[in-house]
Image: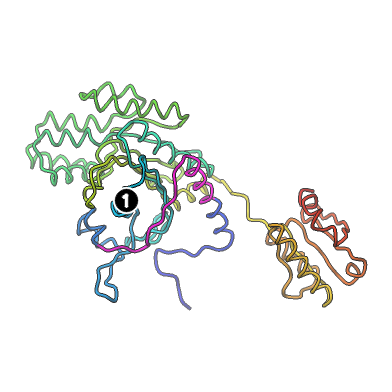
């Protein structure tokens, strides 16, 4: 028997209905905010990802040579793709450019709870002006997406990585060394960072200031402890914009690092508390990537949301979305009834109803049992008796009540039938 590859999953009808329900709600939130959808290839030239993240990332990718000998990789995320697309085609569009995307991504890593080798990501990018409103809009969209599917127990932590980056620059570190130091901070490896500070002659006072900044968390009053008023004021304005947009569950957390070199300013993460220690479901912020791919410098900010992890968090919170239902299931009994039943199927489907019918020629009792298993609202029974009288028997699958309706008036009465 063939088994699915390690780190992948199969989705049955009920799970797919649940996923489509959540996807549709998140997509609707983006469209409601004036964000337009784009789509990129599932595979790209390997260089696209190594340019952004370094050659060491190859160990984490599904990378291979195609039949033409070109180095190709399945995408591990989509931000680099958006920037590639922007530089090649989208830069001519009016600003701000607000786009979102949804699709599968792939990473070759050890599967664990809530993390898979194939996973779905939904995200958005805004390309335009460097203003607090732009950053706030990105955060607000991410929050509205997780709220749209019913997630309740979450917190939004907002920081400014530019503060820590500047403090390391003031210590005379090169860009490469700054990246190394931020990596240790991102992983909360304080002992390694302390050794890094000693190796690079970072003064003890500066080391103490960096560690103190990382512990600042709470409401906007913590920003008063910053030496740089400009950075603190910018973050304060972001928080005020979020308040005006009625975005809740937000707090300042200057310990957020987002250990990727391209983040430069505001950064944020959304934690779903029901997931335990590995609780992050979304991360993002403002960054600089366009020049890396050959475009002119432009402000960019965005986020990526782990779709699968949000669904797991919803399950942990006990939320069970409504199951997919079938409007009508038709049970024909006898050869003559089967021909007429197919006409009724076609007619009702033309009315945009979800309609199925018995193709296995089972007994009435078995058909009713099957109809219940697929969450059918109404069953239409058409036998020789009904056919001779020009009627059908309509059975309500919730109450068990039955009524007879003329076939010729069935379509005009279907709304009333379903609503009852």
Q: Quadrant of residue 97?
A: top left
**Residue 384 percent coordinates (x, y):** 89, 72
Q: Residue at x 35, y 29 (%)?
A: 238
Residue at 32% in and 39% down: 128
Q: Position of residue 328 (x, y in %)?
A: 74, 60
Q: Please say if 251 is above or below 119.
A: above
Residue 283 lies left or right of residue 378; in this view the side is left
Indicate whether residue 29 is drawn in magenta.
yes
Out of 232 and 215, give the one closest to the viewer.
232
The colour scheme used here is rainbow
- Counting from the top left corner in percent of width and height, residue 356 is at 70, 65
Side (left or right) of 192 relative to 115: left
Residue range corresponding to the magenta coloring: 22-46
In the image, is residue 107 above or below residue 142?
A: below
Where residue 216 sits, quadrant-wise, is: top left
Let me know if residue 3 is in the magenta part: no
Q: Position of residue 229 (x, y in %)?
A: 24, 23
Q: Label 1: how many residues lie within 10 Å, few (<14), some (14-19) or many (20+)? A: some
The residue beneath circle 1 is 86
Q: Residue furthest right?
A: 389
Q: In screen coordinates, is 337 left or right of 198?
A: right
Assign a secondary structure to mark 1: helix
Foreground pick, 75 / 180: 75
| Residue name at image x 88 percent, y 58 percent | 404
């Amino acid at each position: 028997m063939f088994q699915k590859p390690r780190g992948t999953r199969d989705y049955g009808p009920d799970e797919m209905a649940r996923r489509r329900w959540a996807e549709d709600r998140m997509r609707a939130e983006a469209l409601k905010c004036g964000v337009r959808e784009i789509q990129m290839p599932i595979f790209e030239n390997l260089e696209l990802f190594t340019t952004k993240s370094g050659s060491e990332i190859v160990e984490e990718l599904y990378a291979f040579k195609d039949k033409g000998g070109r180095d190709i990789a399945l995408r591990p995320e989509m931000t680099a793709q958006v920037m590639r697309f922007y530089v090649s085609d989208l830069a001519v569009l009016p600003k701000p450019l607000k786009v979102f995307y949804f699709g599968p991504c792939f990473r070759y890593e050890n599967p664990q709870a809530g993390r898979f080798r194939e996973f779905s990501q939904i995200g958005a990018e805004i390309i335009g002006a460097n203003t607090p409103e732009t950053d706030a809009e990105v955060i607000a969209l991410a929050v509205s997406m997780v709220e749209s599917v019913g997630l309740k127990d979450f917190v939004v932590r907002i920081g400014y990585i530019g503060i820590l980056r500047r403090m390391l620059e003031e210590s005379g570190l090169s860009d490469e060394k700054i990246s190394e130091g931020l990596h240790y901070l991102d992983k909360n490896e304080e002992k390694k960072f302390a050794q890094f500070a000693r190796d690079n002659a970072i003064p003890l006072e500066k080391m103490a200031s960096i560690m103190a900044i990382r512990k600042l968390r709470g409401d906007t009053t913590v920003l008063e402890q910053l030496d740089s008023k400009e950075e603190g004021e910018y973050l304060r304005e972001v928080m005020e914009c979020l308040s005006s947009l009625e975005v809740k569950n937000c707090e300042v957390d200057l310990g957020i690092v987002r250990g990727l070199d391209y983040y430069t300013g505001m950064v944020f993460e959304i934690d779903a508390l029901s997931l335990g220690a590995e609780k992050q479901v979304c991360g993002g912020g403002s960054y600089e990537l366009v020049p890396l791919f050959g475009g002119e410098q432009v402000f960019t900010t965005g986020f990526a949301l782990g779709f699968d992890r949000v669904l797991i968090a919803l399950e942990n919170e006990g939320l069970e979305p409504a199951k997919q239902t079938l409007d009508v299931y038709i049970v024909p009994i006898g050869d003559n009834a089967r021909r007429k039943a197919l006409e009724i199927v076609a007619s009702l489907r033309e009315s945009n109803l979800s309609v199925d019918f018995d193709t296995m020629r089972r007994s009435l009792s078995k058909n009713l049992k099957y109809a219940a298993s697929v969450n059918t609202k109404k069953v239409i029974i058409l036998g020789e008796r009904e056919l001779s009288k020009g009627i059908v028997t309509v059975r309500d699958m919730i109450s068990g009540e039955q009524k007879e309706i003329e076939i010729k008036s069935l379509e005009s009465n279907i709304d009333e039938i379903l609503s009852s």
